[in-house]
Image (cartoon, rainbow, N blue to C red):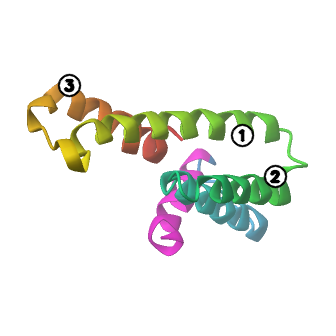
Amino acid sequence: KLIKQGPSVLESYKLLRDGKEIDENEIILTFALDLCLEWVRMFAAQDGVILRQRIHRVLRMFFRGKNYYVDLLDLIHEVEFQTAYGQMNNLLITIEEEKDLSKYSLDLHRRIVHYKRAKYSFYL
């Protein structure tokens, strides 16, 4: 996942830098952040606590001394919530015992896409 997503994160960072050169340390930071983003996406009840702790350990290890560290933590918390909300919307129609597609609507689909994928992929 890191290799698959990594280049897009790196390219996004380069765009934010407005063509300015980035050094090796900044590249490492983008990949560390990308790893945390992938773990947010994989968030599941059975291993959520462990994944969540890994996210914060990596953030602390690579970003603690940065002036934007607290803002980054707030952003990660917000995206964790939004991703969980998107997953909850997805579960509304996929509960094994009650597969009721009548609950599925265009509005529900939009909420799932918006919160479960778009927030983490584009907003973050």
Q: Determine which residue is flagged by label 3.
A: 107
Q: Horizontally, is 113 left or right of 59 in the view? A: left
**How many C-alpha atoms fall within 10 Å of the one at disc 1: few (<14), some, or many (≥20)?**
some
Q: Main secondary structure of the magenta part?
A: helix
Contact, CB < 8 Å: mark 1 with mark 2? yes
Q: Determine which residue is flagged by label 2.
A: 63
Residue 71, image x, y percentages = 74, 33
Q: Residue furthest front?
A: 97
Comes first in the chain, label 1 or label 2: 2
Q: Is residue 13 magenta?
A: yes
Q: Amino acid at mark 3?
A: Asp
The local secondary structure at tag 1 comes to helix
How far apart are the two marked residues, 1 and 3, measured between alpha carbons? Answer: 30 Å
Comes first in the chain, label 2 or label 3: 2
**How many C-alpha atoms fall within 10 Å of the one at disc 2: few (<14), some, or many (≥20)?**
some
Q: Horizontally, is 116 left or right of 103 in the view? A: right
How far apart are the two marked residues, 2 and 3, measured between alpha carbons? Answer: 38 Å
Q: Amino acid at mark 1?
A: Leu
Does 39 appear above or below 17? below
Q: Is residue 50 magenta?
A: no
Comes first in the chain, label 1 or label 3: 1
Q: Identify the residue shown where x is 73% and y is 39%.
A: 73
Residue 21 in view: no
Contact, CB < 8 Å: mark 2 with mark 3? no
Q: Horizontally, is 102 left or right of 49 in the view? A: left
In the image, the segment drawn in magenta is: 1-16
Q: Determine which residue is flagged by label 1.
A: 72
**How many C-alpha atoms fall within 10 Å of the one at disc 3: few (<14), some, or many (≥20)?**
few
